[in-house]
Amino acid sequence: MTRSSNRRCRAPRVAAVALGTLLLGACAAGPDYRGPPKVDTGHGWTQPDTAAPAPASLSSWWTMLGDPTLDRLVATALADNLDLRQAQARIAEERALRDRATGGYAPTVGAGASVTRRRQSENGPLPIGSIPGLARDQTIYDAGFDAAWEIDLFGATRRAVEGAAARLQAAQEDAAGVRVSIAAEVARSYLSLRGAQRELAARQASVQALAQTTDLVGQRFRAGDAAQADVDAAQARLDAAAAGLPAIDARLRAAALGLGVLLGAPPERELALLDTTATPITLVPIPVGQRADLLRRRPDVRAAERRLAARSADIGVATAELFPKLSIGASGGFQALDASQLFESASQRFSIVPLISWRVFDGGRVRAEIRASEAREQQAALAYEKTVLAALGDAERALSDYRLGLDAVRRQQGALDAARRSYAHAQARYAAGDIALTELLAEERVLREAEDGHVRTHTAAAIDLVALFKALGGGWDPAAGDADSRGQGKTKPRSPARQEESSDG
């Protein structure tokens, strides 16, 4: 066999290899995302959970408190709060960006029409004057379309769509996080307002008891049974107790004004709450579920995982620039020198232009962008781990604070019960003439101070309960999220956060 025949035999094989290589390359470049890195979350809470099994959902935890006014405030805030509406607008933006990325699969088509009046030079390269029937002055009528389509051989568009979809899901999780925060802030402000109301009532009763004591000491001073120092001491205690009333009033008004803003309304909207009262909520241990459930419920953890997925897709977008691009251009339409002949078959024109382009040398810019994308993915993986650990720490602190708060409430309740019994004994002894009025008033003052301390402790524990619900991710239902975010969270955790280059088509 001659050398020329060998070359003829090798030519089809070379073409087949080239075609096969091209077809094998027709896949998504870059790593396939397989889930977030595995984070050691421990084996259960540091404090034993003695409550009943966890409820099915904490999506509307505020309804467990049994306060219709709180239910109304939270519902209004979740509908009208401006931060939440901004989050919804960001979701709309990310959805539009995802749709724009999806549009990369389709060709670009444009249509146009023009009328061109021109005069050609008789002394130019085309001898107009010597060509019969070719006028120097011409009017050209043209109508047609142009289309261009870049075939996604190496998955640049596919990875761009994956990244845009992940960013949309991250925006949805951010909105869920805003919802959690808004519900918790409304509840915190409302419980602070109600607690301040009860604290104000207890403080006013204490001031009234001190006023009676001061008046009685004054009477004894005028009768010569008490010294001026006794009068001054009683007056000082009265003034000190009364001086705390304006501060409580200020807290009350600030809480009411803050609720108005949280509800997306003028600050004064909920000032009418100052003229109403409510029964204190009952504080009991709540079920917190398994520690692993926290990562499923916390929107910030879910958002961090989605951002990691987006960064992984960005690597594929950058990697696709290493490979050739195949695009097809087409144009067609009608062109004529006479408007009446524009749409005749003889005036038709068309062209089809396939084009392969390959960036052969760029000074290493593409590979540098790939390395930068990989570094950004690593940052996102570390941010995810940090978010997980911060969520666990947040939940552990909130659980500890609430349990210790319950213990403080129980102890303060014991002190209040003892003060009430002591005051009842003092009333009986006073009625029997065994003690003076000053002793009775002293016992009443102790009772009012115990009531004041119980109110403050109860309010603090109620706010700790709100913080616990927030730390557990309560305030939204993952199963009821936007349809675009469904299906996430089903990948298996692994480390590292991505696999090596994929050859999946």
Image: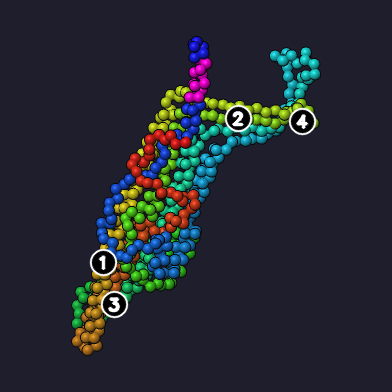
* Relative vertical location of residue 12 with respect to residue 63 in this rendering, above or below: above
Of residue 74 and residue 108, the one placed in the foreground of this image is 108
Q: Amino acid at mark 1?
A: Asp
Residues at marks 3 and 2, CA–CA distance in whole angstroms = 92 Å
**Disc number placed over residue 344 in the picture, else none:** 4
Residues at marks 2 and 1, CA–CA distance in whole angstroms = 75 Å
Marks 2 & 4, CB-CB < 8 Å contact? no
Asked if one can make out residue 372 in the rendered structure from this viewpoint, the answer is: no
Tell me the mark number nearer the camera, choosing from 2 and 1: 2
Tell me the mark number nearer the camera, choosing from 3 and 2: 2
Q: Amino acid at mark 3?
A: Ala
Tell me the mark number nearer the camera, choosing from 1 and 4: 4
For disc 3, the marked residue is 209
Of residue 31 and residue 364, the one placed in the foreground of this image is 31
Q: Earlier in the sequence, mark 3 or mark 4?
A: 3
Marks 3 & 1, CB-CB < 8 Å contact? no
Q: Amino acid at mark 2?
A: Gly
Residues at marks 3 and 1, CA–CA distance in whole angstroms = 29 Å
* Relative vertical location of residue 448 with respect to residue 288 in this rendering, above or below: below
Q: Earlier in the sequence, mark 3 or mark 1?
A: 3
Of residue 48 and residue 448, the one placed in the foreground of this image is 48
For disc 2, the marked residue is 329
Rate crowding at label 4 as few (under 14), some (14 to 19) or many (20 or more) other CA atoms within 10 Å. few
Q: Earlier in the sequence, mark 2 or mark 4?
A: 2
**Disc number placed over residue 290 in the picture, else none:** none
Q: Earlier in the sequence, mark 1 or mark 4?
A: 4
Rate crowding at label 1 as few (under 14), some (14 to 19) or many (20 or more) other CA atoms within 10 Å. some
Q: Residue at x 49, y 41 (%)?
A: 161
Q: Amino acid at mark 4?
A: Glu
**Disc number placed over residue 407 in the picture, else none:** 1
Identify the magenta region: 7-18
Residues at marks 1 and 4, CA–CA distance in whole angstroms = 93 Å
